Amino acid sequence: MSASNHPTGQVRKAPENFLDAQGVRAVFAEAGKGRRDFIRNAFAAAVAGTAATSSALAQSRPVVGDGDPAILNLPAHSTGLGQPVVTDGYGKPSKYEANVQRRQSPGLTPTAQASVSFAPLQSLFGIVTPSGLHFERHHQGWWDIDPSKHRLMVNGMVKAPKVFTLDELMRLPSVSRFHFIECGANTGMEWGNVAVPTAQYTHGMLSCSEFTGVPLITLLEMAGADLKGERFVLAEGADGSSMTRTIPMSLIRSGEVLVAYGQNGEMLRPEQGYPLRLVVPGVQGVSWVKYLRRIELGDQPYGTKDENVHYVDLMPDGQHRQYTSIQECKSVVTTPSGGQMLLDKGFYNITGLAWSGRGKVKRVDVSVDGGRNWRTARLESPVLSKCLTRFNIDWVWDGSPAIIQSRAMDDTGYVQPSYKQLRAVRGTRSIYHNNAIQSWQVQANGEVANVQLS
Ligand SMILES: Nc1nc2c(c(=O)[nH]1)N[C@H]1C(S)=C(S)[C@@H](COP(=O)(O)O)O[C@H]1N2
Ligand SMILES: [Mo]
């Protein structure tokens, strides 16, 4: 099967790509909260006008040589002078991409100091999240901290407690690595079967960057850390949330935990913890402490508020599971995905992302019939450990209803579970750590909706 011997279908973008934030929220307000059908139908109704237009366009598009003005008429950009170089500015995306934005979920109550924004996964390619689209999760808002006044203290069970300035840290040997970060609450709404309409809101508390920094083990060694016996590190942020998390030495010893100042080739963005954040590959986002100001070495887990009260999983036996930190293997199809619309029958490239907090993604299978049959997708390089992996697979849509799913497997052999399998172990009362298989239903009219198969 290839694109060349099938007519190529068109995907109409998700509403986020052509409605502004107010528009998306208005659709939700109309729909009222609650049932997935209301939300889905209202969403579809609000964008029906656009759908009709683009569908008509698709049909009336002239073939080459048939008088297509986009071919025959020389545009201004081919005959005139272009813009001068931007000498003193920071480059921006095309104005035609202005609606590709991180957004607050229309399904969550808006607050004065919004605390989560989601990355527009359905609009991204490859594995790297552009820094301006990285999701945000702030427990007390973000700050743009003066780096010359920021300090990192290393204390606790160390012979020589140390305080580093940013300049001192940046003189040390550095490494650069690609890793995903996923909030433990990502896909949390789906536990309650409150389906949010698009991949941005189901899976968008997920991003991937190239991080640059100093291995934490280097700083501990410089401070003369006593590393005999069981050891744990407490990481503390400088913002008002007094975010503190325990990091086990087993992760730090390998050198993969970084004190990072770089993100995608430049300094961290303020929203991502400028000037310093902890990078804890494979572990849920909350442990990636931003505005990092202190590292303490101890001999037992610290049991902070962010690990005793938050980010715990209520299990079927009524007990809370603590310190669930590794993000298990997971994947999501980003096109076709909720809110998009297939405008024709024909060839489509199904594409998505897969990741595992335990290592590399080994395989991704894709089903278009709700899990009865599976085909193995192509993994695009690079396939890196604890990093997003892009997958693609060909599909010819015959115009009948379909349910698209992806199921990832990592190099430990672990396979991403269905909702049924996940609930069998975890029950129904969780908020965090949902890595179940996502289902997107393609309806006969081409609309794509978020559904859950039982
Ligand atoms: N200091 C500090 N660190 C923090 C947080 C915070 O509010 N303050 N939020 C945590 C949570 S819950 C997540 S999911 C990630 C989000 O990182 P991001 O905003 O760069 O996407 O940062 C973590 N580190
Ligand atoms: Mo989080």
Image (cartoon, rainbow, N blue to C red):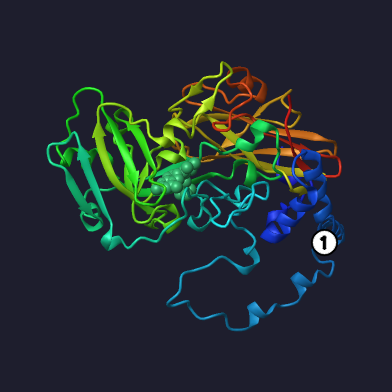
Decide if residue 101 is on the left or right side of residue 308. right
- Residue at 52% from the left image edge and 19% from the top image edge: 319
Question: Label 1's element?
Answer: loop
- Residue at 22% from the left image edge and 43% from the top image edge: 154
Residue 105's place in the image compared with 365, above or below, is below
Decide if residue 110 is on the left or right side of residue 414. right
Decide if residue 53 is on the left or right side of residue 414. right
Furthest residue to the top? 317
Mark 1 closeness class: few <14, some 14–19, many ≥20 residues within 10 Å: few
Q: Check disc 1 and report the residue beneath it.
A: 63
Residue 177 visible (yes or no):
yes
Residue 343 visible (yes or no):
no
Question: For the C terminus, which image quadrant?
Answer: top right
- Answer with the quarter of the image where residue 369 lies: top right
Question: For the N terminus, which image quadrant?
Answer: top right
- Residue at 86% from the left image edge and 40% from the top image edge: 444
Image coordinates of residue 311 in percent, x first then y, are 49, 33
Q: Amino acid at mark 1?
A: Val
Image coordinates of residue 151 in percent, x first then y, are 25, 54
